Image (cartoon, rainbow, N blue to C red):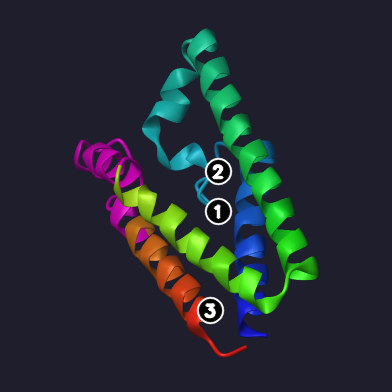
Amino acid sequence: MITKIVLLAFIALEFSNVVALYFFPGSKRANAVGVFSAWEKSKQLPEVHDLMRYLVFWVAGTKLIFLLLLGLIVVFADLNMQRLSLIALALATLTFFWRMFPLARKMDREGNIQPKNYSLILGGMIIALIVVFIIGAISGN
């Protein structure tokens, strides 16, 4: 049961991000891209802003595919597959610290992210997610 709860909570959390990215990409909530000053600056160059919007929608679409597959795992997979899915989520989420976190820290230090130190908050949230995935994977049910 814990594995399903962790998977469903993650689906709900990420679905809020998909909604924000599709319908409110400039928002500073739900990890949309409004926290980056480049989002507003890109509006001065329509071709750059169109590219940014395209990439944001691409991320949202990819997340939606991923969430629907996770939903199928919750509904149809056995406990062992659900646990393996949580381990896969933990490993995949760790890649955030390879490319995205260093870039977010750089932009944060340069004052290109608001609120200040958002990259640290995001990094903490990502670590918490990884811990929850691992706990869910090793739980007894």
Q: Looking at the figure, which quarter contains the C terminus? A: bottom right
Q: In this picture, is 89 found above or below 36?
A: below
Majority secondary structure of the magenta segment? helix
Q: Are marks 1 and 2 in contact (CB under 8 Å)?
A: yes
Crowd rating for badge 2 (residues with CA inside 10 Å; few <14, some 14–19, many 20+): some
Q: For the magenta stretch, what is the residue range? A: 99-121
Q: In this picture, is 14 found above or below 46?
A: below
Q: Which residue is depicted at the point 51% across and 60% down?
A: 89
Q: Amino acid at mark 1?
A: Ala
Distance in Å between CA atoms under marks 3 and 1: 23 Å
Q: Residue 20 appears at what percent x and percent y?
A: 63, 45
Identify the secondary structure beneath mark 3. Answer: helix
Q: Which residue is depicted at the point 41% across and 64% down?
A: 125
Residue at the spot of label 1? 30
Q: Amino acid at mark 2?
A: Ser
Q: Looking at the figure, which quarter contains the N terminus? A: bottom right
Q: Amino acid at mark 3?
A: Gly
Q: Are marks 3 and 1 in contact (CB under 8 Å)?
A: no
- 91 relative position to 70: left or right: left
Identify the secondary structure beneath mark 2. Answer: loop
Can residue 115 be seen in the rendering of this structure?
A: no
Residue at the spot of label 2? 27
Between 39 and 7, the one nearer to me in the picture = 7
Q: Residue 67 appears at what percent x and percent y?
A: 68, 53
- 27 relative position to 41: left or right: right
Mark nearest the camera among 1 and 2 is: 1
Q: In this picture, is 136 found above or below 71?
A: below
Please give the label number shown on residue 136.
Answer: 3
